[in-house]
Structures are given as structure tokens and as C-alpha cells.
Image (cartoon, helix red, strand yellow):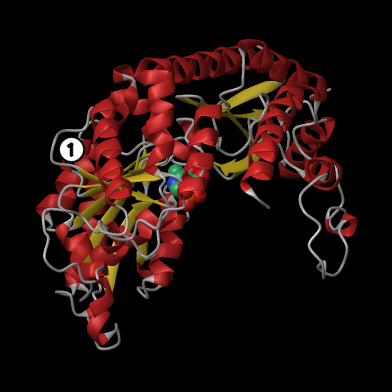
Amino acid sequence: LDWDEFTRLGAEIAEWGAAYHRSLPDRPVRAPLTPGAVAARFPKAPPEQGQGLDGVLAELDDKVVPGLTHWQHPRFFAYFPANATPASMLADFAASILAQQCMLWQTSPAGTEVETLMLDWLRQGLGLPEGFHGVIQDSASSATLAAVLVMRERALNWAGNQQGLPGQQRLRIYASDEVHTSVDRAIWVAGIGADNLVRIPTQGPLRAMDPVALKAQIANDRAAGYLPAGVVACTGGTGTGACDDLRAVLAVARAEGLYSHVDAAWAGAAMICPEFRDLWQGIEAADSLVLNPHKWMGVQFDFSAHYLKDPEPLVKTLAIQPEYLKTHGKDGFINYSEWSVPLGRRFRALKLWFVLRAYGLEGLRAVIRDHVRWSQALAEELRADPRFEIVTEPVLSLFTVALRGADDAAMIEYVNRVNEDGRIYVTQGRTGGRIVVRFSVGSFACTEADVQLAGQVLKQMAG
Ligand code: PLP
């Protein structure tokens, strides 16, 4: 493939991409396929001879597109969104073309410095105080793993990496039931053991961790010979949007000498709107926090913003310097590979730069505010219909709803019926011991009419 062909196919792919996105409102959100149907369209063996790329877009349309769940569909109300704005697609294309490996400052001075700068722009947008240092992780799960590893190493006086965990005092980490399961996996991977993640009960309308129970559990654990190491709090839990009272929880963590991490993977993006910041009041006391611009800020996956009050414990936990990774003779820069588990890193900061340049903070705020307003209006509409029961009140643009009197089997059947219809896509969840519909507005392509149509579908399918 020469650069002339690259230019021609690059233009074609842009046209094809725009046509795909324009076609989305007319497509079912979720692929109506049986497992294996996509793979069956491909030859079983790889080509021996190169065929060039002419015709590849038609093949994409034929073989791949029918098997997609359309995450950028305007009526995608499932999970949390994974928005890719056109600006971030173009940035990702540019990043692919530049093909940087940004593991050290010297392997990409621009990649490193733009990352530092973009995360500082975002910090300002979020209203976080100066002194939080940002790094891009591939996912919130990776950021939480990094934080849990710091909790482990800090509590063990940096002996875990060297000596392993056998023979060490048993660690304990605390989170509420509402914190995403990425914390469980972080505990497993860190070798701390699932039993040593203690889930603290929640209370109140925001299902916030009970700080008194947290303090009592820490005291009991110390008395029983455990070594409390850290607290993982959440702003905007996955199931119902639960938010911990960060002031209270982080005060306990601080008083007990524990490292704290806040998972705001979804809701963090909304903190660019000052009126929503009540949900994470007290965040400035966190040692570490993560939010995913790849969810609700239009920054193409993957892009998790991980902020640290003090990067030093993280670097002490993760940095490794064989001779070839040493950067002799210069200082005053960051080697971001020392802040994350992977060594190699893409030039992801370009995506945030393009998105901020294209939308500005005001443009992004307008999108998020619309989603919150439309979602809350739909919750009110369903509340007014006696067939529905709002199970958890909207937190930002997420609420849960159930059919009044329906048992779990009937609810699963209802969710399947809604999704098989194809006009909208929602996810089921479990809260208060029952199956509910999680309704989350977040697609950048969504309009008010799409949310209204969702209301009609939910009602029609309720019978
Ligand atoms: N935390 C929360 C609150 C989430 O909702 C999710 C995913 O939806 C995650 C963490 C994991 O995010 P990631 O896919 O970036 O690891």
C-alpha cells in the first residue's frame, strides 16, 4: 500500500464512516444475530497472497457491520456510553499515523508533554484543585489496579513487590457494595485475596458507604490482626449511580492513615458542570481518583484520566529501570510508563485535545446537561404510569425502573422483549434484591426525541 493509495482510501474511509453514522438511527441498536454468524462470513484460513485493500469497505459492510452492537447509536441506553465524537476519531487517526510510543519523555517529548498539559486542562475543567497530577490509563480498571497496588505496597512498607505476600500481615481494603467489580479484580490481581475486600454497608438515597461502619470495621480488623491498607470510594456507581459522602469517607481514611481512591469512571465527566459537583464534595482529600472521558466526554476509547495527589507512591510501586529505560543526562520531565502497569503507551492525549478544541468545555457541558434533563423527564413520565415503579431515583442521567409486581423472570423477559424490538437498548441490573431496568442516557448522538421514543418503547413492551 503506497501513500497515494493511503490518501485515496483514507478519504473513502471518512466518507464510509460518515455514511455509517448517518445510517444509525435506522438500524437496530443491537445486532439481531446468533453466535458464530459473523465468523462464518470469513474464510477459515488467512490469505497466502496480498490482495490490497480495494473493496475492503464493501466487505466491512457485508461481513462486520451487521454483527455490530452500535455503541454510537442515538438510542443506546445500555451500560454506560462509550462515546466517540468525530473529533476524537480524527485525533485517533492522527495518533495512528504518528504512531508514537510514549513510554518515556525521550521516546516522545510531545506525547508526554501534551499528556501532562491535557490532563491539567481537564483538571481545571473538573474544578479539581492544583496539585492533582494526571496520567492517562487505558481503563478505569487499570487505574484502580494501580491504586490498589499502591495501597498494598504503602501498607507493607514497599516489601510486597520484593518479597511477595506470604508471611506478611493480611491486608484489608474497604469499599461499598456499589463500587464497580474492577475493585474485586484489582484485589485478586494484587494478590490480596477476595476475602480481604470488605464491602461496607450503604445508607441514604445515594446509597453512600456508612462512614461509621467503615471506621468500626477498620478498628475490628486491626484488633483481629489485619493490616488496613486503603479505601475505594465511588462517585456514580455502575448499578444505580451511588455516590459516597467523600467528605466523611475520606476523613476516615485519612484519620486511619489509609490510602484513598475514588472511582468516578462514569459520573466524573459530569463534574465539568459546576452544578453537579455536590456529588463529589470533598474529592480534594482523595489520594487518587479516576474518571473515563471515554464514557461521557466524547473521547474515543481508550482514555481514562487518573489523578494523583502525589505521584511518588505510584512511581515507587510501579517504576522499573533496566539500563535501556534509564534517561541519562536530562531531568525535569515525566516518564509516564512509570505511572502505569503497561510499558508501551499510545499518543492518547491527542484525543482530548481535539475534543476540547472542537467542543470547548461549554459544548461538552451542554451535551451532559441535556442528557441529565431528558433522563429525569423520562423518569417522571414513567412514574406517572401505574405500570411502572421507579426503583432508584435518577443520579445524573441514570435511573432504574421496574414493572410493578413483576418477579425476576418477568423482568428478564421484559428486558429481552425491549431489546429484541431493536429500537432501543437497555441493560438489566439488580438492586434491592430485584431485577430492574437500568436506563442511562449518554450517547452524544441522542436527541430529546430519542429519549421520548424510548419512553414509548418501554410502555408498549410493558403490555
Ligand atoms: N467503574 C465504574 C463506575 C464503571 O461503570 C466502569 C465501567 O462501566 C468501570 C469502573 C470500568 O471501566 P473500564 O472499562 O474503563 O475499566
Tell me the quarter of the picture where residue 75 sits: top right
Find residue 352 and report its horizontal and vertical position in percent.
Answer: 39, 35
> Mark 1: few, some, or many residues within 10 Å (few <14, many ≥20)?
some
Tell me the quarter of the picture where residue 40 sits: bottom right
User: Count the marks: how many?
Assistant: 1
Looking at the image, is 220 positioned above or below residue 309? below
Residue that appears at 28% across and 60% down: 104
Asked whether residue 458 is in view, the answer is yes
Find residue 383 and report its horizontal and vertical position in percent.
Answer: 61, 16
Residue that appears at 74% across and 36% down: 415
Side of 385 relative to 304 (left or right): right
Residue identified by numbered label 1: 284
Side of 42 relative to 260 (left or right): right
Looking at the image, is 340 positioned above or below residue 61? below
Q: Name the residue type under label 1.
A: Glu
Find residue 416 and report its horizontal and vertical position in percent.
Answer: 79, 39
Question: Which quadrant of the figure contains the C terminus?
Answer: top right
**Residue in front for this viewpoint, 333 or 296:** 333
Residue that appears at 48% across and 36% down: 91
- Label 1, ligand 1: CB separation under 8 Å: no
Q: Secondary structure at mark 1?
A: helix
Asked whether residue 392 is in view, the answer is no
**Residue in front for this viewpoint, 269 or 416:** 269
